[in-house]
Image (tube, rainbow, N blue to C red):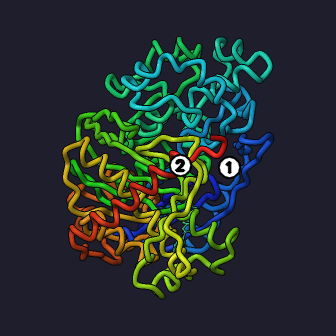
Amino acid sequence: MEKFILSIDQGTTSSRAILFDKLGHERYSAYREVKCLFPKPGWVEQDALSLWVSVIDVINEVLVKANITFSAIDSIGISNQRETTVIWDKETGMPIYNAIVWQSRQTSYICDRYSKYKDLIHEKTGLLINPYFSASKIRFILDNVENGQQRAEAGELMCGTIDTWLVYRLTKSETFATDVSNASRTMLFNINTMEWDEELLSLFNIPKCILPEVKPSSYDYGAATFFSKDVHIRGVAGDQQAALFGHTCFNQGDSKNTYGTGCFMLMNTGDTPIYSKNGLLTTIAWQIGDKVTYAIEGSVFIGGAVVQWLRDQMRMIDYAAQSEDEALKSSSTHGVYIVPAFVGLGTPYWDDNARGAVFGLTRGSNKSHFIRAALDSIDYQCKDVFDVMVKETGNNISSLKVDGGATQNNYLMQFQADILSTTIEVAKCHEITALGVCYLAGLNSGFYSSLEAVSEIHENEKVFPPKMSKKEINTLCKGWKAAVKATRAFKPEG
Ligand code: ADP
């Protein structure tokens, strides 16, 4: 009988279940949208029970589609939206508050109280103080649910990121654990000692007994007895780290970039954490056996979102792919630059106050120039992250592995290869995050024999070699830098 790995990808907007075969090919998949709740401006929450139900649904559906039972499943891998936090009652297993989603800003005021600890927090966790990470979300729930702190201290509550919640439910309360990649996004995990950090726990007044055990990413988390006592969960990782693994970025310097709504670039930095002075985050990529691999991460807030903006707000295109045809109607942007700082600028500028701008308009400027400039802005922002990464790690990136919806745009990918002077490799698998945890699970079960064997089956869909001269790159990038500088200098109130 043919066997499969069942990968679950629980994201912010959807849950997916995918069956991968021995060659790492996606054979069957099922998908459910999940709802976000917006109780107040800037707040984003989700019903943790609905997330669990959506996972049950997609697992059942994918098995029905494949016409198989659990006897054909070798093992299960789970990747998840990172940082999103759930707290539930140990006795009943019911959440005591909605899951607070990574994007939510509702705990900014808590983070503000800790700003004087920013160096300590960076040194211990590799992170910058921000409401994204779990620590302030846990604090918020314990403060806002009746007797929250008291119940936590009495050991009546359990707290986890979405991986922990799903593993707990799938194993019918047997396993209360998280993997190192998820733990490293809580702002409570010391990435040097590989333990929950006592000093940070006491700063945030979070009792250690509510936190899960931290395990390797490729590890036997126990049987998924909710479905079958014979099938074990053997791979767990946060989505971006899972994607790095899915791209087979197994060696130091190997890097990937995901072009979704925003862009997330991660580089494998090997067995030592590298600390950035320019706002890159240091994080744990994964752990296999005793071997811990670190990564450095940078993000662009508005990536593919600028294309959605062209479609929905500017009404210049009807669908995303049309942006490529429009861009190719001219041979350049004719000097037009767009800086899509709609919500500020991320790495390496970290400017919350900047707002979007367009430069270089003339009587000759047209829609094609504008759309091309918008696409280019995604690539320029990624280049800014890339340049800092290369500089701070000392690693040369000779090829960048990419995935995400916007990688379907060949113009975008070629221009990226050109201005980075680096080959761009688009993965054949469009569910690279799920593939990452498929590999992690399969390596634990023996479905895949080694990292080398996994590298051998990995396939690219397209490769874009760089074609632009250094002189041309310099001229274009000078314009971009000037545009960013002017954008940041713009103060409408003087
Ligand atoms: P997410 O996981 O963040 O929802 P996806 O990986 O599904 O993102 O990619 C969706 C994003 O990619 C959208 O922002 C969309 O505008 C953009 N996108 C999709 N297709 C194209 C295309 N052909 N050209 C440019 N952008 C695209």
Density class for disc 1 (Cα within 10 Å; few <14, some 14-19, many ≥20) is many
- Residue occupying image coordinates x 69% and y 75%: 315
In the displayed structure, 162 sits above or below 421; it is above
Q: Is the residue under label 2 in contact with that under label 1 (CB below 8 Å)?
A: no
- Residue occupying image coordinates x 40% and y 69%: 21
Q: Which amino acid does label 1 sit on?
A: Leu
Residue 46 point in image, percent of width and height: 71, 45
Residue 328 point in image, percent of width and height: 45, 85
Mark 2 secondary-structure assignment: strand
Residue 119 point in image, percent of width and height: 41, 21
- Which image quadrant for residue 196? top left
Density class for disc 2 (Cα within 10 Å; few <14, some 14-19, many ≥20) is many
Which of marks 2 and 1 precedes in the sequence? 1
Depth check: give the residue in front, 26 or 98.
Answer: 98
- Residue occupying image coordinates x 53% and y 13%: 203
Question: Does residue 231 show up?
Answer: no
Instruction: State the separation of the CA atoms marked 1 and 2.
Output: 11 Å
- Which image quadrant for residue 456? bottom left
- Which image quadrant for residue 170? top right
In the displayed structure, 473 sits above or below 112; it is below
Quadrant assignment for ligand 1: bottom right
- Residue occupying image coordinates x 50% and y 86%: 325
Q: Which residue lies furthest to the bottom in this view?
A: 329
Residue 393 point in image, percent of width and height: 23, 42
The residue to which callout 2 is attached is 80
Return the mark for residue 51: 1
**Along the horizontal axis of the image, is 39 left or right of 341?**
right
Mark 1 secondary-structure assignment: helix
Question: Does residue 479 show up?
Answer: yes
Depth check: give the residue in front, 342 or 184.
Answer: 342
